[in-house]
Image (cartoon, coloured by chain):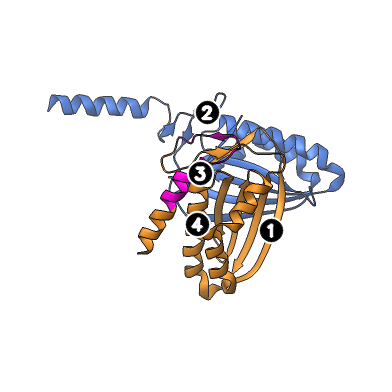
Chain colours: A blue, B orange
Amino acid sequence: MIQNLLAALLLFGLLSCGGTDRETHPSEQPGMCAKEEMAADGIVRLSKIEVWPQFLDEYMKYAMEVGEISLRTEPGVLTMYAVAEKENPCKITILETYASKEAYDKHIASAHFRKYKQGTLHMVKSLELTDQTPLNPANRINNFME
Amino acid sequence: MIQNLLAALLLFGLLSCGGTDRETHPSEQPGMCAKEEMAADGIVRLSKIEVWPQFLDEYMKYAMEVGEISLRTEPGVLTMYAVAEKENPCKITILETYASKEAYDKHIASAHFRKYKQGTLHMVKSLELTDQTPLNPANRINNFME
C-alpha cells in the first residue's frame, strides 16, 4: 500500500517536473527541445506558398529562420519541413505538424512567427493551408535540425 | 495466407537489406532496416494522387501495404509518408525520398511496388510527381514504422 502510494507520488513528480501538463520526450539531437506527444486535436498540414520571383531569395532567409527556431525551440512543433519545386522554386510546400491546437496557437503567437509573417506578407503571391490525415498512424516522422 | 506472405516478404527484406555497397546507418527502430545516406542524385518528391471515390477504401489498403514494406525493407527509401486531405480524402500526397537514382530504380522494380502499381492503376484518377529541393539541408527527417 505504502509502496503503491510512493510509486504514485514518484510518477506524479516525474510527469509534472517538466513544467508542462503535456507529456514530452527528450530529443536525442543536440540543440533540439523535447517534443510533446500528438494530442487528439493535433494538426497535420500541408502549406502551399507561391512567392513572387523577385522576392524569392529574401523569402528563403525568413522561411529558413522561422523553420529552424520553431523546430528547435517549440515542444509542440513536431514537423516543419519545407521543400521547393525543382522546376519552379517559387512554389514551396511545408509539412507542418503541431501536437495540439494549443501548440499551433502558441506557434502563430510567437515572436519568430510574427516576424516571418509580417516580414514576408508582400512577398507571398498565394497561400493555401490544407489539413491532412496521415494514411497510417504507425508511420512516424522524427524531424530535427542537424 | 496473405499475412504469412507479408511476413515472409518483410522478413526477406529485413534479412537482405544489409547487402548493399552504399553506406548504411543502423536504425534504432525494431523492424526497420538500416538506411543509406542521401547521395548527390538522391530524390525528394511530392507525389499527388487523386483516387476515384468508389475505390478509396481498396486503394488505401494497397497504399498502406506498399508504404510499410518499402519503408521497412528498402535501405534507399528514406521517407514514404502519405497524407490525405481532411476535406477530400481522395486527394493524397506522399513525401517520398530516395537515397539515389539507383535506390529509386530498385523501388519501382520491386515486387511490392509492382503489385501496388498494377493493382491500383484503375483506381487512380490523376497522378502528379513533382521533384523538390529541401529549403534547408540541415532540416532532417527520420521516417519509420512504429
Q: Which numbered dot is residue A135?
A: 4
Q: What residue type is disc 3 on? A: Cys
Residue at the disc numbered 3: B17
Q: Secondary structure at mark 2?
A: loop
Amino acid type at circle 2 is: Cys
10 Å crowding of disc 4: few (<14), some (14-19), many (20+): many
* Inter-mark Cα distance, 3 to 1: 26 Å
Question: What amino acid type is highlighted by mark number 4?
Answer: Leu
The residue stretch that appears in magenta: B10-28
Report the residue at 42% width, 43% height from top: B31
Quarter of the image where one finds residue A68: top right
> Mark 1 — residue?
B129
Frontmost of labels 3 and 1 is: 3
Residue at 38 percent across and 63 percent down: it is: B2
The residue wearing badge 2 is A33
Question: Where residue B87 sits in the image (x, y, percent)?
Answer: 56, 63
Q: Residue A17 location in percent, x, y?
A: 38, 24
Mark 2 or mark 4: which comes first in sequence?
2
| Chain of the residue on which disc 2 is drawn | A
The answer to the question of whether label 2 and label 4 lie on touching residues, with beta carbons closer than 8 A, is: no
How much space separates mark 2 and mark 1, taking CA atoms? Answer: 34 Å
Kind of residue sitting beneath label 1: Leu
In front of the other: B50 or B71:
B71
Q: Confirm whether the magenta stretch covers residue B144.
A: no
Image quadrant containing the C terminus of chain A: top right
**SS class, disc 1:** strand
Distance in Å between CA atoms under marks 4 and 1: 18 Å
Mark toward the viewer: 2 or 4: 4
Crowding near the residue tagged with mark 2, few <14, some 14–19, many ≥20 C-alpha atoms within 10 Å: many
Q: Quadrant of residue B84?
A: bottom right
Q: Secondary structure at mark 4?
A: loop
Task: Identify the chain of the residue marked 3, using the numbered disc in the image.
Answer: B
